[in-house]
Image: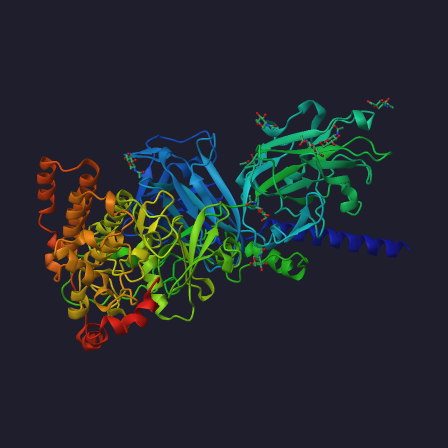
C-alpha cells in the first residue's frame, strides 16, 4: 500500500516534469518565417530581443520603372514616447506601385504587421499620403490613412498564407505616395486560429482556417499593457481602462501562482501568463438581480463581422464549480452560466479561451461586451474576464494590385531570419523531448530553421514588362522583345468574387457577346457596377489579346479611355473587368436599336471625347500606342453620355514585341480598315485616324459601315459617303432625324474633317490632335455661329505641322505580305461579309 502510494507520487512527479517540459516547449515556439524589416534604413534596429533588418541591402523591395523608392529618415532627433520608437525613425517611400516580396518557408498562419509613422521628409509629407496595401489575395488597407487618433500605428493582420511567396504591394492613390516604416511577417502556431467557432445567436461558424483577420483590439483585462517582448508571438496587449465602462462594479485581481495550462486548451501562445493572471471580477451583491453587468465598449468598423476571443482563467475561486456567469456581446447571450472549472475539468487557474463569431456588428460602430451574473438559483453573483481579442473578418472587396518579380518562379530571393536562434544547443534537448511528448495540438516546426545570408548575386528587380510605356525611342530595326506572358502589374480579382458578382455568370446578366466571349454586367460587393468580359477559353488567339489589354490598360488612366478595374486568370480563365458604361456603345445609339436619336451637339461631344482618348493614346507616351480597332462599337458611353474608348486587345506600341505570324496579320474590323495598312502592311497612328474618320461618317449618317442589303455602290459607307462629300453634297445623306438641326457651317467643317481623315495616304491625314481641334471648332460653329476671328485662329491650329516624330511605323514581315495581301486587298466588299460578321462586336 505504502509503496504503491510512493510509486504513484513518482509517476505524478514525472507527469509534472513532462508537463513542465511541454510548457517550456510551447514557450519556445520558433517561427519558420520570421521577417523583421526596418524599412528605409541602412542599419538594423534591435527591439528587445528582435532584430529588424535594414531593407536597403535586401532584394525584397520590388519597384516598377515608374516608381522611385526613397529611404527617408525623420529629422526629429528621437521619436520617443511610444513603443518600438527605433522602427519609426525611418521609412521607405514609394511614388508608384511597389512591393515587398517574402519567400515563405511554411504555409499557414502568419502575423503580418505594418508600422506607420507619418513624418515630414524633404518635400514628402507622409501625413498626406493616401494609398492602398494588398497581398495577392486580399486588400489589407484600402485607404490609408485609416481613421486613427494616434500618431503612429501598427496594423496587425493574421493571414493564412498558402502561396510560396507573400507579396505586399503598396499602391499610392493619384499622385500621392505610399510609405511604410517597418514590416513583420512571422509564422504563428497553426492552431492559433481553429476552423470553427460559435456563431453568436445559434450555430457554428466554419471556415476560419482560411479567413484573413485583422486585429482591431487586444486587451489585457485588469492588468498592465503587455508589450511584444513579453508575448511569445510578439503581440501587444493594451490595458483595458479606456474601454471599461463601469469601473465601480468590478475589481481588478492578480494571481501570483503558477497557472495550470491544460492539454487541449489554451497555451502560452494563445495569450501570455501576464494576461491570464490578471482579470476583472464582478463585485457581487447579495442579490443577483441587483448586480450590474461589467461592460467594455469598443469602436469598430460597423459594417464587418468579427471574431471575438474571450480569455478566461479562474484565478479567483477557492474551489471548483463555484463560479458561474453570463457573457454577452451587445445584448445577445454569448454564453450562459459559463462554468470555467467545468471547461477545465475541475482545475482552477487553468487558462481557457472561447471564440465567438459576431456575424454583423452594430452600424453605429460601437461594440459592447459584457459579463453579468448568472441567473442560476444557487449561483453567487460573480463573473470574470482576463483578456479579449477582437478581430475583423471582412476585408475590402476592392481589387488587389500586384507588383510581382519578373519571373516569380525562377528568382530565388534570399531569406532573412531574425536572430532568434541563439543557444540552439541548449534548446535541442527540450526540442527532442518535445517531439517525444508531442501533444495532440502539434506545432509545425521548420525542418532546418537556419539563417541564410542574403545572396551576393542580388540585383535590384524591376519590371521590364512595363518599360515599353515609359522608355524607348523609335526603333527602326527589328528588336525582339520577350512576349509579355506575365502581366506583372495588374489588378487581380479572385475568381470567386467575379462568380458572385455575376451570379455565377448568369445569362441574364449578359450585356454583350463578341468573338472574345461574353460580357456580363456585374455588381461587386462594394456595389460598384462593372462589366466583366469573360474570354472564351477555347480561343487561343484570345490569350495574346487578353495580355495586351491588361498590360496596356493597367498603365493607362484617362477620362476618355475605359478603365480596367482588374482581371482574373485563375483556372485558365481570361476575364477582364472594366468600369461599367451605363449607356452602352455609341453604335447602339446611332442605329439598329430603339434608342432615341442623339442630338448633333451630343454626337459632336461624343466624337470629341473619343478623339481625346485616341489623342492621348497616340501622344501620351514616349512611344505611340496604336489602337488598331477604332469603331463605333468600341466607343462606350457612361451615364452622362461621356465617350470612352475601349477594347485595346489589338493595340500595338511602336515596334512589334511579339514576332509570331499571328501578331503580324492585318487585324481590325472590316469597313474601318485603313486601306494603306492592308495594302502596304504599314501600321501607323494614322490608321486609327482613318478608322475614326469612318466613325465620324457613321455618326452623321447613322448607318452601318457595311450594309450588304443596300445597292452595291452604297454597301461601304466610307466609299459611298466620301463621294458625296467630294461633290459637296454630304447634306443629302445625313441622318434625317437631325438634318434640320445642323448648321451648314458646322456640317461643312465636319465634312472636311472627315475627308482629311479618309485621305488615301497616312501622311495626308491629320493627326488625332488636329482632328480633335477641328471637331471642337465644328462644335463651336454649331453653338455660336460663324465668327471670323475664331476661324482664323482655329485654322492656324489645324494647320500646325503634324507631329511626325511620334508616328511609329511598323513594318509587317515580308513572310506575311503575300498572305495578308491575298486576304484583304484582293477581297471585294461583297465576299467579305462573312468575315465582317465574325469580327463585328468583338
Ligand atoms: C497632384 O498634386 C498636386 C499638388 O502637388 C495637386 O494639386 C493635384 O490635385 C494632384 N493631382 C491628383 C490627381 O491627385
Ligand atoms: C490554411 O488554409 C488552408 C486552405 O486554404 C487549410 O487547408 C489550412 O489548414 C489552413 N491553415 C491553417 C493553419 O489554418
Ligand atoms: C516583461 O515582464 C516583466 C515581468 O512581468 C516585467 O518586469 C518587464 O518590465 C516586462 N517587459 C516589458 C518590456 O514589458
Ligand atoms: C433582490 O433584489 C430585488 C430587486 O432589486 C428585491 O426585490 C429583492 O428583495 C432582493 N432580495 C434580497 C434577498 O435582497
Ligand atoms: C446584463 O446585460 C444583458 C444584456 O444586455 C441584460 O439582458 C441583463 O439584464 C443585464 N444584467 C444586469 C444585471 O443588468
Ligand atoms: C437589445 O435587444 C433588443 C431586442 O431583443 C433590441 O430591441 C434593443 O435595441 C437591444 N438593445 C441594445 C442596446 O442593443
Ligand atoms: C458610441 O461610442 C461613442 C464614444 O465611444 C459615444 O459617443 C456614442 O454615444 C456611442 N454610441 C452608442 C449608440 O452607444
Ligand atoms: C462579412 O463577412 C461575412 C462572412 O464572411 C459575410 O456573411 C458578410 O456578408 C460580410 N459583410 C459584409 C458587409 O461584407
Q: Looking at this view, name the residue that lies furthest to the right.
A: 1
Q: Position of residue 690 (x, y in %)?
A: 19, 58
Residue drawn at (50%, 60%), measured in percent from left and top?
507
- In the image, is 651 to the left or to the right of 8? left
Report if residue 631 is visible in the image: yes
The residue at 62%/46% (across/down) is 270
Which corner quadrant holds the N terminus?
Answer: bottom right
Query: Quick check: which quadrant has ligand 7?
Result: top right
> Relative to 153, does residue 622 appear above or below in the rendering?
below
Q: In the picture, residue 95 is in which quadrant?
A: top left
Q: Quadrant of residue 543?
A: bottom left
Q: What is the number of callouts on the image? A: 0
Q: Nearer the viewer, residue 806 or 676?
A: 676
Please state which of residues 117 and 406 is positioned toward the viewer in this rendering.
406
Residue 657: image quadrant is bottom left
Q: Name the image colouring.
A: rainbow
Q: Is residue 255 left or right of residue 580?
A: right
Q: Position of residue 60 (x, y in %)?
A: 37, 53
Relative to 361, say whether 574 is above or below.
below
Q: Check the image and report above or below for 349 versus 499.
A: above
Observer-nearest of 776 and 711: 711
Q: Position of residue 7 (x, y in %)?
A: 83, 56
Percent x, y of residue 665: 25, 71
Indicate the quadrant containing the C terminus: top left, top right, bottom left or bottom right: bottom left
Residue at 17% x, 42% y is 777
Res 235 visible: no
Amino acid at each position: 500500500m505504502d509503496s504503491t502510494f510512493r510509486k504513484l507520487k513518482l509517476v505524478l512527479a514525472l507527469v509534472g516534469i513532462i508537463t513542465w517540459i511541454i510548457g517550456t516547449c510551447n514557450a519556445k515556439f520558433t517561427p519558420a518565417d520570421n521577417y523583421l524589416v526596418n524599412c528605409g534604413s541602412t542599419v538594423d534596429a534591435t527591439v528587445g530581443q528582435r532584430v529588424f533588418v535594414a531593407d536597403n541591402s535586401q532584394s525584397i523591395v520590388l519597384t516598377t520603372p515608374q516608381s522611385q523608392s526613397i529611404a527617408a529618415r525623420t529629422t526629429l532627433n528621437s521619436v520617443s514616447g511610444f513603443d518600438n520608437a527605433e522602427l519609426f525613425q525611418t521609412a521607405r517611400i514609394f511614388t508608384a506601385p511597389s512591393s515587398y516580396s517574402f519567400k515563405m518557408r511554411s504555409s499557414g498562419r502568419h502575423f503580418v504587421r505594418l508600422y506607420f509613422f507619418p513624418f515630414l521628409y524633404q518635400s514628402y509629407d507622409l501625413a498626406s499620403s493616401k494609398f492602398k496595401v494588398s497581398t495577392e489575395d486580399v486588400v489589407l488597407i484600402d485607404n490609408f490613412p485609416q481613421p486613427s487618433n494616434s500618431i503612429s500605428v501598427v496594423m496587425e493582420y493574421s493571414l493564412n498564407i498558402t502561396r510560396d511567396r507573400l507579396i505586399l504591394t503598396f499602391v499610392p492613390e493619384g499622385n500621392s505616395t505610399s510609405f511604410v516604416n517597418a514590416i513583420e511577417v512571422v509564422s504563428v502556431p497553426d492552431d492559433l486560429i481553429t476552423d470553427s467557432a460559435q456563431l453568436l445567436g445559434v450555430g457554428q461558424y466554419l471556415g476560419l482556417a482560411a479567413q484573413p483577420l485583422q486585429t482591431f483590439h487586444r486587451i489585457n483585462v485588469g492588468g498592465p499593457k503587455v508589450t511584444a517582448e513579453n508575448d511569445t508571438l510578439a503581440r501587444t496587449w493594451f490595458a483595458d481602462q479606456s474601454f471599461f465602462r463601469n469601473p465601480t462594479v468590478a475589481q481588478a485581481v492578480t494571481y501570483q501562482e503558477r497557472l495550470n495550462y491544460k492539454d487541449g486548451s489554451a497555451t502560452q501562445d494563445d495569450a501570455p501568463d501576464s494576461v491570464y493572471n490578471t482579470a476583472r471580477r464582478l463585485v457581487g451583491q447579495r442579490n443577483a438581480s441587483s448586480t450590474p453587468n461589467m461592460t467594455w465598449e469598443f469602436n469598430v468598423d460597423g459594417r464587418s463581422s468579427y471574431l471575438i476571443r474571450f480569455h478566461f482563467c479562474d484565478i479567483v475561486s477557492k474551489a471548483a464549480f463555484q463560479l458561474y456567469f453570463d457573457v454577452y456581446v451587445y445584448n445577445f447571450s454569448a454564453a450562459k452560466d459559463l462554468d470555467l472549472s467545468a471547461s477545465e475539468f475541475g482545475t482552477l487557474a487553468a487558462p481557457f479561451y472561447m471564440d465567438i463569431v459576431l456575424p454583423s456588428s452594430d452600424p453605429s460602430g460601437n461594440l459592447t461586451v459584457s459579463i453579468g451574473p448568472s441567473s442560476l438559483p444557487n449561483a453567487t453573483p460573480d463573473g470574470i474576464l482576463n483578456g479579449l481579442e477582437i478581430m475583423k473578418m471582412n476585408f475590402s472587396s476592392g481589387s488587389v494590385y500586384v507588383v510581382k518579380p519578373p519571373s516569380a518562379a525562377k528568382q530565388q530571393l534570399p531569406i532573412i531570419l531574425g536572430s532568434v536562434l541563439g543557444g540552439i544547443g541548449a534548446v535541442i534537448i527540450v526540442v527532442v523531448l518535445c517531439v517525444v511528448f508531442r501533444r495532440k495540438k502539434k506545432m509545425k516546426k521548420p525542418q532546418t530553421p537556419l539563417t541564410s545570408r542574403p545572396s551576393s548575386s542580388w540585383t535590384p528587380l524591376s519590371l521590364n514588362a512595363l518599360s515599353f510605356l515609359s522608355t524607348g525611342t523609335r526603333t527602326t530595326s527589328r528588336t525582339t522583345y520577350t512576349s509579355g506572358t506575365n502581366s506583372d502589374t495588374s489588378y487581380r480579382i479572385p475568381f470567386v468574387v467575379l462568380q458572385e458578382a455575376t451570379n455565377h455568370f448568369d445569362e441574364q446578366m449578359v450585356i454583350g457577346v463578341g468573338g472574345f466571349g461574353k460580357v456580363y454586367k456585374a455588381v461587386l460587393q462594394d456595389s460598384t457596377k462593372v462589366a466583366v468580359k469573360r474570354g472564351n477559353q477555347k480561343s487561343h488567339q484570345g490569350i495574346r489579346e487578353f495580355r495586351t489589354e491588361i498590360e496596356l490598360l493597367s498603365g493607362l488612366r484617362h477620362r476618355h479611355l475605359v478603365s480596367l478595374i482588374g482581371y482574373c486568370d485563375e483556372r485558365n480563365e481570361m476575364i477582364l473587368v472594366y468600369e461599367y458604361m451605363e449607356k452602352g456603345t455609341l453604335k447602339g445609339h446611332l442605329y439598329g436599336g430603339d434608342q432615341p436619336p442623339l442630338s448633333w451637339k451630343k454626337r459632336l461631344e461624343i466624337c470629341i471625347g473619343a478623339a481625346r482618348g485616341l489623342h492621348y493614346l497616340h501622344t501620351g507616351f514616349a512611344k505611340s500606342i496604336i489602337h488598331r480597332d477604332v469603331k463605333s462599337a468600341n466607343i462606350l458611353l457612361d451615364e452622362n453620355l461621356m465617350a470612352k474608348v475601349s477594347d485595346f486587345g489589338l493595340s500595338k506600341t511602336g515596334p512589334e514585341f511579339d514576332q509570331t505570324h499571328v501578331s503580324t496579320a492585318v487585324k481590325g474590323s472590316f469597313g474601318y480598315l485603313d486601306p494603306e495598312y492592308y495594302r502596304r502592311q504599314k501600321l501607323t497612328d494614322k490608321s486609327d485616324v482613318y478608322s475614326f474618320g469612318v466613325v465620324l461618317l457613321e455618326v452623321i449618317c447613322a448607318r452601318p459601315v457595311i450594309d450588304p442589303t443596300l445597292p452595291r455602290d452604297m454597301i461601304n459607307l466610307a466609299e459611298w459617303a466620301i463621294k458625296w462629300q467630294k461633290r459637296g453634297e454630304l447634306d443629302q445623306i445625313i441622318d434625317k432625324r437631325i438634318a434640320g438641326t445642323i448648321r451648314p457651317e458646322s456640317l461643312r467643317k465636319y465634312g472636311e474633317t472627315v475627308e482629311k481623315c479618309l485621305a488615301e495616304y497616312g501622311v495626308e491625314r491629320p493627326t488625332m490632335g488636329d482632328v480633335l481641334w477641328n471637331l471642337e471648332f465644328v462644335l463651336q460653329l454649331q453653338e455660336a455661329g460663324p465668327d471670323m476671328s475664331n476661324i482664323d485662329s482655329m485654322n492656324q491650329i489645324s494647320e500646325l505641322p503634324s507631329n511626325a516624330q511620334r508616328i511609329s511605323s511598323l513594318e509587317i514581315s515580308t513572310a506575311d505580305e503575300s498572305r495578308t495581301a491575298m486576304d484583304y486587298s484582293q477581297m471585294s466588299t461583297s465576299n467579305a461579309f462573312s468575315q465582317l460578321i465574325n469580327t463585328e462586336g468583338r
